Image: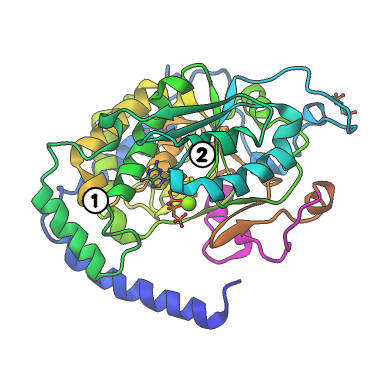
Amino acid sequence: MMTKTRYIFVALAILISLHYILSFSHEGYGKATSFDNLKAQWEGFRGQKDTTVNADGPVKVWHEPPYKTPVPEKYFLNGTFDKPTRRASAAIVSLARNGDLNGIIRSMTQMEEKFNHRFGYPYVFLNEEPFSEEFKRSVSGLTNNLVEFGLIPHDHWFQPDWIDEEKATKNRQWMIDNNVIYGGSVPYRNMCRFNSGFFFRHPLLDKYRYYWRMEPDVRYFCTLSYDPFLFMQDEGKKYGFTISLPEYGETITTLWDAVKEFVRDHPEHVVKDNAMGFLSDDNGDSYNRCHFWSNFEIGDLDLWRGDAYMKFFDYLDSKGGFYYERWGDAPVHSIGAALFARKDQIHFFEDVGYRHEPFQHCPQEPLHSQNHCSCDAKENFDREGWSCLNRYDRIFT
Ligand SMILES: Nc1nc2c(ncn2[C@@H]2O[C@H](COP(=O)(O)OP(=O)(O)OP(=O)(O)O)[C@@H](O)[C@H]2O)c(=O)[nH]1
Ligand SMILES: *[C@@H]1O[C@H](CO)[C@@H](O)[C@H](O)[C@H]1NC(C)=O
Ligand SMILES: [Mg+2]
């Protein structure tokens, strides 16, 4: 999909913005954490033998990424009339505005057709404004399953009072001037902070352990003949993704400094055999900006509800970076998953064909035929130079 000229243009744009990031980041933002100090800590975790965190038994030594092993047969429904014999505690979760109705209809129709009409999972829709009757009626009509609509508590959504609005305005203006995508938007920032730290606390999700995030106007290309929630549950997975790529540097200027400070102050929360190697190419000194694209997620809500991530989120939130910069839920979730779950608990759903503009993951043969994928196998983000899948793969070898 990327033509050569487009690629060159993008590379140029990155170079130019790098220049600006440098001038921006010298504005006296948070103090950098000493590298030596931190390096000793990452190494400390690796050497740690009897960590109480994540003591799930003996740790397997990996020679290749776990997704190279096909999903076991036992998870599959075979004949057209096979019915699931059990179900996980899970829901399909979507944050949406009333104005997203058409996009939600398109996403949900495919979700039902490719997967959920056979598996029968409920849906939860969340919004900071009440959903209209039309929205509720239209969406509920697309499935036979339970659909619930929740209102987001005010304080989980809007910019907190302690944010210095003058500083926030100034920084948004800088982003507008530098063409940072969504750089001028406060609602977008509310959304990123909510997805980072609050969606899993909504009372409608209390009864569930796993979730599949669904956005408006996405595409699901392939038939999914097994239950990914049961797979996650039975295989002990905590976070699943389909696409991974680098974040725009301008949106997260001081995020990594904050992460390093948190790790320095709370080393007990970082698990052994984590996925640090996905995030950093220099042993934790700097962030390579790789993240799992969070518009698709299948995850364990308890990863976010746990002490480690809750403290991590509160720490990041206290820095104000969701508003002074434009920290996205994708890097924040990705860093959380990479540090607070074991690397083998992060799963690449290679068999799920998925598109959110402007990128798609299209499964290759033999998955493409087996799952009747309706995408062009040549158009596959894994193959793009930008994909961070190589960073994920390498942590297992
Ligand atoms: N209720 C509500 N939902 C929102 C708001 N902004 C975004 N969302 C939802 O949050 C999710 C992410 O927002 P998007 O606008 O898709 O952001 P994005 O995926 O980074 O960017 P796009 O390329 O525009 O899709 C989607 O599920 C949106 O429907 C908002 O102000 N209110
Ligand atoms: C589908 O076939 C596999 C392999 O034969 C089996 O393990 C699995 O239980 C079958 N699924 C159902 C729902 O019967
Ligand atoms: Mg989107």
Residue 315 located within the stretch drawn in magenta: no
Closer to the N terminus: mark 1 or mark 2?
2
Residue found at x 81% / y 26%: 74
Q: Is residue 26 above or below residue 307?
A: below
The response on whether ligand 1 sits within 8 Å of label 2 is: no
- Which label number is shown at residue 41? none
| Residue range highlighted in magenta | 372-393
Q: Amino acid at mark 2?
A: Phe
Horizontal side, residue 93 vs residue 222: left or right: left
Question: Which residue is the site of mark 1?
Answer: 254
| Majority SS type along the magenta span | loop
Percent across and percent down for residue 47 are: 42, 30
Residue found at x 23% / y 30%: 265
Q: Nearer the viewer, residue 10 or 97?
A: 97
Horizontal side, residue 276 vs residue 83: left or right: left
Q: Nearer the viewer, residue 112 or 144?
A: 144
| Residue 344 visible | no
Percent across and percent down for residue 390 are: 57, 55
- Which label number is shown at residue 135? 2
